[in-house]
Image: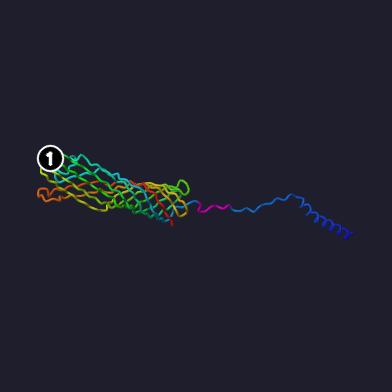
């Protein structure tokens, strides 16, 4: 009896084991994908940090005031007598090269830049005095041959690859200046001349603003405007004749050196 009961239990257990896979096959199957960690973009967007060098070209025009002149004698070289000066010119091409470094933090960029530029800007001023006793004329010429700047820059990145900035700092340049005063005494039939010239490097300051766009990861293009104010230019005129009475008479002609530059540039970022 015990043997038969054991066989019956074993048979029931075997049948139950065989039935379990079949029942499991009838249940719906749901796939559970393995979670994958989300990937965060690292270094996305253009970064302005780094050294760069480039070239620029543009146009400059003078903002200098009229020439003033003073002399050792009250009668000669008098502004009031001349009634002011007519100034012409002062516009011309400018072009050069620049180097600099930028550092970006967030949407802000700070940096420093130095440039050196050729300039073709010359002003000429002319004043005249005509009377029954004396005819006098003074011609003044001032030429900016080259200029450079050393500036700080601070900028903001409103959208990727686009930078707007303000800039300012030291400016310097070479100015070549000359002046000639011609005095004619009609009743004496005599003409006297005073003249002088000088060339010097002048120092001053500059302020400006610009916008720059990164065309590629290494090449950027910019448009920039600068206002430059160098120290005054002065030239002393000495008598060139042989009259002892006039030999000690001298004059000083003065003009300021202010100009504006609008230029475009290309930079290569290392």
Residue 177: image x %, image y %?
24, 50
The residue sitting at 49% across, 51% down in the picture is: 45
In x, y percent, where is residue 130? 17, 40
**Residue at which label 1 appears:** 133
Query: In which quadrant is the C terminus drawn?
Result: bottom left
Looking at the image, residue 194 sits to the left or right of residue 112; the answer is left
Which quadrant would residue 75 be assigned to in this image? Answer: top left
The quarter of the rendered structure image containing the N terminus is bottom right
Q: Nearer the viewer, residue 108 or 213?
A: 213
Look at the magenta stretch and give its main secondary structure.
Answer: loop
The residue at 22%/40% (across/down) is: 84
Q: Specify the segment rendered in magenta.
A: 38-44
Residue at the bottom extreme?
3
On the image, the x and y values in percent for residue 232 come to: 25, 48
Between 269 and 43, the residue placed more toward the observer is 269
Q: How is the image coloured?
A: rainbow
Is 235 part of what is drawn in magenta? no
User: Residue 74 at x, y = what percent?
Assistant: 14, 43
- Mark 1 neighbour density, 10 Å: few (under 14) some (14–19) many (20 or more): few
Label 1 secondary element: loop
- Answer left or right for 260 relative to 186: right
């Amino acid at each position: 009896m015990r043997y038969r009961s054991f066989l019956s239990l074993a048979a029931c257990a075997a049948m139950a084991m065989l039935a379990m896979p079949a029942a499991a096959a009838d249940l719906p199957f749901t796939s559970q994908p393995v979670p994958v960690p989300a990937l965060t973009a690292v270094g996305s967007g253009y970064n302005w940090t780094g050294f760069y060098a480039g070239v620029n070209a543009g146009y400059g025009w003078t903002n200098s005031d009229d020439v003033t002149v003073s002399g050792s004698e009250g009668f000669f070289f008098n502004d009031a007598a001349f009634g002011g000066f007519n100034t012409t010119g002062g516009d011309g091409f400018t072009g050069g090269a620049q180097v600099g470094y930028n550092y970006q933090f967030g949407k802000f960029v700070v940096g420093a830049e130095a440039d050196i530029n050729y300039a073709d800007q010359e002003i000429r001023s002319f004043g005249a005095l005509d009377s029954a006793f004396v005819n006098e004329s003074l011609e003044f010429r001032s030429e900016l041959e080259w200029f450079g700047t050393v500036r700080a820059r601070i900028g903001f990145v409103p959208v990727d690859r686009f930078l707007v900035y303000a800039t300012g700092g030291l400016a310097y340049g070479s100015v070549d200046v000359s002046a000639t005063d011609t005095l004619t005494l009609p009743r004496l039939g005599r003409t006297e001349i005073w003249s002088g010239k000088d060339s010097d490097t002048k120092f001053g300051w500059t302020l400006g603003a610009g916008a720059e766009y990164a065309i590629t990861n290494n090449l950027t293009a910019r448009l920039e405007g600068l206002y430059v104010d160098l120290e005054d230019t002065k030239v002393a005129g000495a008598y060139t004749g042989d009259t002892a009475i006039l030999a000690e008479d001298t004059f000083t002609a003065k003009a300021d050196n202010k100009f504006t530059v609008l230029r475009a540039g290309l930079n290569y970022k290392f």
